[in-house]
Image (spheres, grey):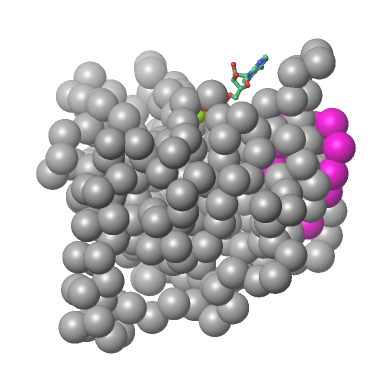
Amino acid sequence: MLEVVQLTKRFGGFAAVDRISFRLERGEILGLIGPNGSGKSTTFNVIAGLYAPTEGSIKLDGVEIGGLAPNEVCRRGVARTFQIPRPFRKLTILENATLAAFYGSADRITRAEAERRAHEALELIGLPREPGVGLEGLGAAGLKKLEMARALATRPRLLLADESLGGLDEAEMNQAADMLRRIRDERGITIIWVEHIMGVLMRVIDRAIVLDHGEVIAQGLPTEVAHDPKVVEVYLGTDADAVQQQVRAQEAKSAKTPQEAKVPQGANLREGDSARPH
Ligand code: ADP
Ligand code: MG
């Protein structure tokens, strides 16, 4: 569905994203992980059209989208959430989602249809759908949910979810992880999930890519990545044992319920995917 080749984004002389390559199969949940400042959000920003790539290519279903404006990328079926939620604070929850549906959908739709799509997204996410409910009651978790509902209201094929768990407690994080899996399972939406809390992420992703200083240092199945010596060194450190244990527990659980263990076709690492010859 998505093919990123040798993608680079420089700010002045500084390469925030440095020749990264990866591909994403339809129906896959891909985890994009790495330490703070490793280039995760910048990768999203370039794919979503906020910045044009300095070099490299981004193909969505074979069509180049690198350098298109954000609204154009969105209309082609790519929605994203922001790490820091960006709602219209003076509008209601329903209005926020309706606006996203109206301006972000691939087709030209009526206001009534936009509201219908907003309802649908809010229901899936579990936010109030009644008109008139404002943002005042939403805490950190609620605002993250609204960010997700606005993205879903555009009816994307590909969802880019940026660090949606920061500021949430453990139970809220697990709920959010389960919700992403539900979005994929029930709506067939392909997902790239950026998150630096690796244990939670490992519960739902099919495959992971690890960035460090803008470069891909590892990619593969969760268990491969969690045991990769370079990933342990630059990223997991003292958390390595805990994360590896979580991955094992998840694998054991999946083995007991084969329907959940289903990895989308073609989700395995392919030869030559790595941006660097490590
Ligand atoms: P992550 O999301 O992995 O924490 P970012 O992609 O936000 O990392 O940032 C990667 C690097 O690029 C950081 O060093 C950050 O300071 C830098 N950066 C991000 N956006 C800009 C920008 N608009 N201008 C200059 N530097 C930026
Ligand atoms: Mg970020």
- Can you tell which quarter of the image residue 60 is in? bottom right
In the displayed structure, would residue 45 be above or below residue 73?
above
Name the one closer to the observer, 246 or 103: 246
Residue 138 horizontal side relative to residue 183, left or right: left
Q: Classify the position of the N terminus by image quarter.
A: bottom right
Q: Total of numbered circles in the picture?
A: 0
Q: Is residue 208 visible?
A: yes
- Which percent across, then down, holds residue 99? 51, 36
| 225, 9: nearer the viewer | 225
Q: Write the residue at 46% across / 54% down.
A: 228
Instruction: Judge by depth and name the residue closer to the eye, 143 or 275.
Output: 275
User: Is 183 situated left or right of 4 in this image?
Assistant: left
Q: Position of residue 120 (x, y in %)?
A: 36, 56
Q: Residue at x 80, y 32 (%)?
A: 52
Relative to 2, does residue 96 appear above or below in the rendering?
above
Quadrant for ligand 1 reads top right
Q: Residue at x 22, y 32 (%)?
A: 168
Image check: 253 left or right of 112?
A: left
Residue 55 lies in the magenta stretch? yes
Residue at the far top in the pictured view = 12
Q: Residue furthest left?
A: 171
Is 42 within the magenta? no
Residue at the (41%, 44%) spot, across then down: 232
Please report the bounds of the magenta region as a residue range: 46-60
Q: Nearer the viewer, residue 135 or 10?
A: 10
Does residue 103 show up? no
- Pinpoint residue 75: horizontal percent, then vertical percent: 68, 49
Against 79, residue 1 (above or below) is below
Percent across and percent down for residue 88 are 44, 22
